[in-house]
Image (spheres, rainbow, N blue to C red):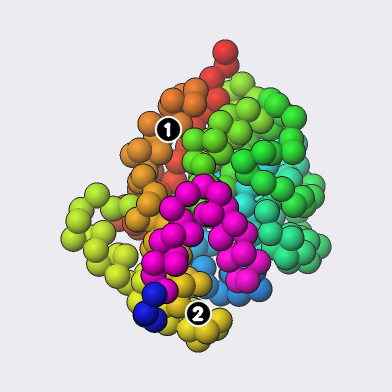
Amino acid sequence: MTPGSRPSLDAALAAPETKGRYVRRLFATIADRYDLITRLLSFGLDQRWKRRLLEVADLRPHHRVLDLACGTGDLAIGAAACGADVIGLDITPRMIELARVAGAGAVTTGRVSWMVGDMMALPVPAASCDCVTTGYGLRNVPDLAGAIAEMHRVLKPGGRLCSLDFDRPESRLVRGVYLTYLTVVGSTIGWALHGDPDTYRYIPASIRRYPGARAVVKLLEAAGFTDVQHVPVLGGLMAIHVATRGRT
């Protein structure tokens, strides 16, 4: 840890406006190494968790799916392999470039297209999606309640939201060990790949400010979602949320 580096990260995450700018710069920086880092920090389990998310989504041929914070496209491509027609959306143009390359080489029965866009103002008509998916999207938005409201808006009545993200363990001991691991590993990888420990130290810093899976359940319910479920993953270090837009 370099003197003064942590306060600059904390300051960047302190307000929605500064967090939004920081996240845009961060993901533009790490886009080409995003998959590698995700595999390292998840102990190689990331793809298993995403397959589980798609199983929970229970997609059908020709379902219209919006995959938010799509990154390099693995969830969107997986949804298209289920026969769904998918839009993968990410705020980082380089992520979309990489996703297009990955999608061009994938075998799918559904269609997949790509779009640069903001989760806070989705360029999608209201009530147009059967399912919204996101992997590691909720924790990164500058305004969580606002992003959830946008997801609710674009879902059809009866449509489903499925989200995978880090959780904030309730046990103080478990949380301390977990965040220490992410901080040490993230700092080391950040120095090695970018010469900046804050690059991946963002993850534990964002988890500290994240309300946690149980609080996200309450936010989803407050936005009008019903049948909200919280599925712990990896002993509660991760979580899958499933929620349905009410039919009224």
13 inside magenta stretch:
yes
170 inside magenta stretch:
no
Would residue 77 be seen by someone viewing this image from the given angle? yes
Say which residue appears at 43% left-offset and 53% top-offset: 14
Alpha carbon of mark 2 to alpha carbon of mark 1: how far?
Answer: 34 Å
Q: Is residue 236 above or below residue 6?
A: above
Mark 2 lies on residue:
196
Residue 219's label in the rendered image is 1
Amino acid type of the residue that numbered disc 1 sits on in the rendered structure = Leu
| Total numbered badges shown on the rendered structure | 2
Say which residue appears at 32% left-offset and 72% top-offset: 181
Would residue 203 be seen by someone viewing this image from the given angle? no
Point out residue 20 in the picture as x, y percentages from the top left corner: 57, 53
The crowding category of the residue bearing disc 1, from other C-alpha atoms within 10 Å (few below 14, some 14 to 19, many at least 20), is: some
Label 2 close to label 1 by CB (< 8 Å) = no
Quarter of the rendering occupied by the N terminus: bottom left
Q: Which residues are drawn in magenta?
A: 5-30
Residue 19's label in the rendered image is none
Point out residue 113 in the picture as x, y percentages from the top left corner: 79, 50
* 11 or 186: nearer the viewer: 11
Q: Is residue 171 left or right of residue 77?
A: left
Point out residue 137 in the picture as x, y percentages from the top left corner: 54, 50
Point out residue 30 in the picture as x, y percentages from the top left corner: 60, 71
> Disc 1 on helix, strand or loop?
helix
